[in-house]
């Protein structure tokens, strides 16, 4: 389970954050209260075992091993909500919510029973999403706790799950892909979630809930925020790029809608990045996290708060260290450039770090670092350039003596421009 320390230098807010606002009762509390602690180790990376672990994980969250046996009786077609009268609509809605909470296995064996269950759950999710989308803010205030708990459990039981082990990509293969101009994040079918159609619908539902419960009803979502945000951001470890993209949209909406959660979101994202750098726990979602941070940094007020400078120096700069740097080079370069535009005093520590950690035997990373330095130089003035020109040209001289063809083609002629 993802444990987050209670104190962190990242626990900061934007200038417009409401620091004095009380954190009231929430959807996150419902998630935290109803989710038991569990820990499962997956000994194999095979598809069959991964599916089995996901099935068992779903049963553990429900707290009942016999939940799968009950699923067949629950997953029976129900009349559409549009065709139900006012007296029956709430009962049918709760039944459809219960169907959405069931885990339906997506395997290679296409049994008729499983196919029918998938269709029933998919239709139920679509109707619940439509009902949430058409409901008014006043309706949310009047609905009882059972309905809200049911919607929360759909998110909890479908998204907060055991992920299969991450398949670490070979660094030499990554370098070769970059050298020939290909994206090293090419994804094979083994990385994709088999039940993605249902997961996609659940992400749509979560996005709607954040918007509905965030407009004038912020108290629905903001207690036990550490646990909720931690569980949500852990999904950035997913191998499926489609899930990471949907998660990025959800977190972005969460950050923009719910101001009291902003410090917690930044803190949790910072811890994920620190784990990636120092704990040898590769996070597949670093590019998506950095894209979110780029929008956040762009909204920082100047002068920067000390907490934001600390985030830059202690978290963003160390992200240049891993050999997987080239997987998120573009997003990290954008974040660094945005920070430097906000505060030119960060130019010298940035160049001190980059030149001090310059790779000696990794030509692909060297070329990308030169590209990032070129971007920074285009945004600073003469005063800042004078502070870093001597160590920079010493490093350029060392690089010019090497025979790497990409450096010779692209960067030797540009040395004389500065």
Image (cartoon, rainbow, N blue to C red):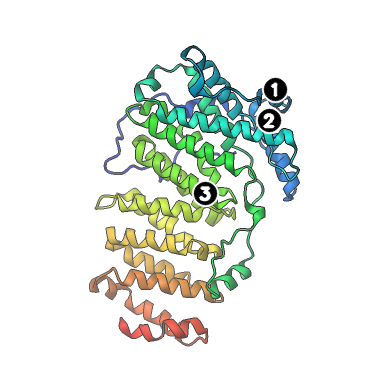
> Looking at the image, is mark 2 or mark 3 earlier in the sequence?
2
Q: Residue at x 55, y 44 (%)?
A: 235
In the picture, residue 24 is in which quadrant?
Answer: top left
Q: State the residue position of label 1.
A: 73
**Dot 2: few (<14), some (14–19), or many (≥20) neighbours within 10 Å?**
some
What is the number of the mark on residue 179? none
Task: Name the element at disc 1.
Answer: helix
Query: Where is residue 69 shown, x and y percent of the image?
Result: 74, 25
| Helix, strand or loop at mark 2 | helix
Q: Is the C terminus in the top left, top right, bottom left or bottom right quadrant?
A: bottom left
Query: In the rendered image, which quarter is residue 8 located in?
Result: top left
- Give coordinates of residue 40: x percent, y percent: 69, 39
Write down the residue under mark 2: 59
Q: Is residue 318 above or below residue 124?
A: below
**Circle 3 residues within 10 Å: few <14, some 14–19, many ≥20:** many
Residue at numbered disc 3: 244
- Looking at the image, which is closer to me, 253 or 132? 132
The answer to whether one can see residue 123 in this image is yes
**Residue 118, image x, y percentages:** 64, 35
Q: Secondary structure at mark 3?
A: helix
Q: Is residue 304 above or below residue 208?
A: below
């Amino acid at each position: 389970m993802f444990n987050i320390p209670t104190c962190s230098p990242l626990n900061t807010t934007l200038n417009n954050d409401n620091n004095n606002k009380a954190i009231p009762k929430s959807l996150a509390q419902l998630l935290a209260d109803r989710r038991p602690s569990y820990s499962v180790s997956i000994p194999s990376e095979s598809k069959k075992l991964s599916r089995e672990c996901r099935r068992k994980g779903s049963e553990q969250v429900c707290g009942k091993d016999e939940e799968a046996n009950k699923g067949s009786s629950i997953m029976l077609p129900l009349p559409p909500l549009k065709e139900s009268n006012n007296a029956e609509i709430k009962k049918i809605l709760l039944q459809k919510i219960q169907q959405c909470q069931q885990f339906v296995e997506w395997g290679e064996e296409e049994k008729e029973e499983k196919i029918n269950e998938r269709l029933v759950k998919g239709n139920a999710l679509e109707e619940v999403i439509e009902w949430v989308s058409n409901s008014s803010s006043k309706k949310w205030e009047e609905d009882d706790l059972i309905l809200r708990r049911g919607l929360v459990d759909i998110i909890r039981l479908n998204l907060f799950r055991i992920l299969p082990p991450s398949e670490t990509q070979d660094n030499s293969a990554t370098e070769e892909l970059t050298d020939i101009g290909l994206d090293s994040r090419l994804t094979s079918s083994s990385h994709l979630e088999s039940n993605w159609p249902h997961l996609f619908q659940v992400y749509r539902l979560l996005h709607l809930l954040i918007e509905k419960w965030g407009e004038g009803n912020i108290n629905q979502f903001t207690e036990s925020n550490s646990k909720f945000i931690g569980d949500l951001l852990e999904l950035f470890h997913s191998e499926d790029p489609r899930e990471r993209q949907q998660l990025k949209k959800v977190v972005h909406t969460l950050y923009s809608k719910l101001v009291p959660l902003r410090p917690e979101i930044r803190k949790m994202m910072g811890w994920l990045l620190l784990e990636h750098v120092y704990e040898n726990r590769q996070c597949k979602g670093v590019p998506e996290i950095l894209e979110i941070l780029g929008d956040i940094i762009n909204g920082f007020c100047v002068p920067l708060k000390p907490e934001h400078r600390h985030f830059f120096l202690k978290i963003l700069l160390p992200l240049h260290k891993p050999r997987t740097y080239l997987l998120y080079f573009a997003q990290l370069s954008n974040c660094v450039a945005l920070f430097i535009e906000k505060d030119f005093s960060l130019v010298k520590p940035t160049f001190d770090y980059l030149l001090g950690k310059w790779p000696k035997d990794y030509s692909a990373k060297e070329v990308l670092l030169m590209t990032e330095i070129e971007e920074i130089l285009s945004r600073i003035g003469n005063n800042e350039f004078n502070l870093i020109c001597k160590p920079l040209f010493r490093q350029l001289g060392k690089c010019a003596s090497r025979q790497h063809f990409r450096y010779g083609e692209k960067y030797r002629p540009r040395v004389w421009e500065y």
